[in-house]
Amino acid sequence: MRQLTIVIPILNEAKNIVHLIPEIHKVQLKLNLRKFEILLIDDNSSDDIQLVFNKLKKKFKYLKLHVRKKDRDLSKSCIFGFEKSTNKNILVMDGDLQHNPKYIKNLFNKYISGNFDIVIGSRDLFKRKNKGLSFIRKLFSIVLIVVINFLLGAKTADPMTGFFIFNKKIYTQNKKNLYASGYKILSDLIYSSKKKLKIGDISIIFKKRNTGESKMSLFILLKLINFILTRWLKKYFFFKNS
């Protein structure tokens, strides 16, 4: 169990990655891991990520970069990382520094000690102040969480987060059922699973973005709404008796 792959989907995050990887390194040293790797899954960025990677790779041998040339999509990038992972424990986090690496230890330890299928870094939007979210994004997130909980069932405090650790078998056993597109791969994994999952949460504070721009857009939001409706229809109509 002392193995871990960290999958980081990125797009024009070179200026953030140069700071993020050394911070992750400090944390992973405390986890006493037998096997460890970081997979940067790049959606064909236009910045100097290759130069940054080459410099970081000299010090951090476990760092790998995979570039996807077509069909930019965060969920597809994550899935690509899942396929490339050589470890059964996979942690997903953003590359924009909004997910603080200090929480990796808490996520990993709870996941291991509690024998969870998934442990989620919950932004706890109803209680905590998260400076990384604008009022509008926070409002949209809360509304979507309420809708997801109502239509699909409450599984976690924050099905919209992109910071979580899970067992790779959840992906391999359910990949044919995945919506596999859009912005929120966590919700896809949870609500596409055929079996009941043991899910845990830890509270995190969502940081402000350091550089770059948010990937959220109207198109992404529409995809997310389509995912929720598709999963609801499958749950209560098409596949109710399957």
Image (cartoon, rainbow, N blue to C red):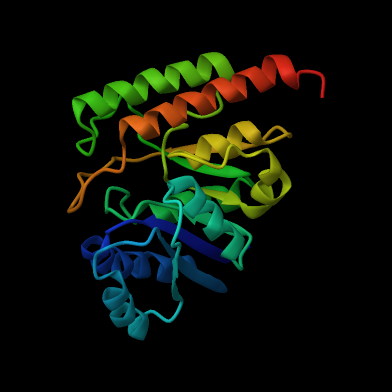
User: Visible in this render: residue 108?
Assistant: no
Q: Residue 164's x, y, as percent?
A: 47, 46
User: Visible in this render: residue 46?
Assistant: yes
Q: Residue 9's x, y, as percent?
A: 41, 55
**In the rendered image, which quarter contains the C terminus?**
top right
Q: Depth check: 5 or 203 in front?
A: 5
Residue drawn at 56 percent across, 73 percent down? 35
Residue drawn at 25 percent across, 65 percent down? 14
**In the rendered image, which quarter contains the N terminus?**
bottom right
Residue furthest to the bottom: 58
Q: Depth check: 72 or 225 in front?
A: 72
42 relative to 212 in the view: left or right: right
Q: Residue 16's x, y, as percent?
A: 24, 61
Residue furthest to the front: 70
Q: Depth check: 68 or 239 in front?
A: 68
Residue 132 vertical placement versus 157 (above, below): below
Residue drawn at 35 percent across, 35 percent down? 123
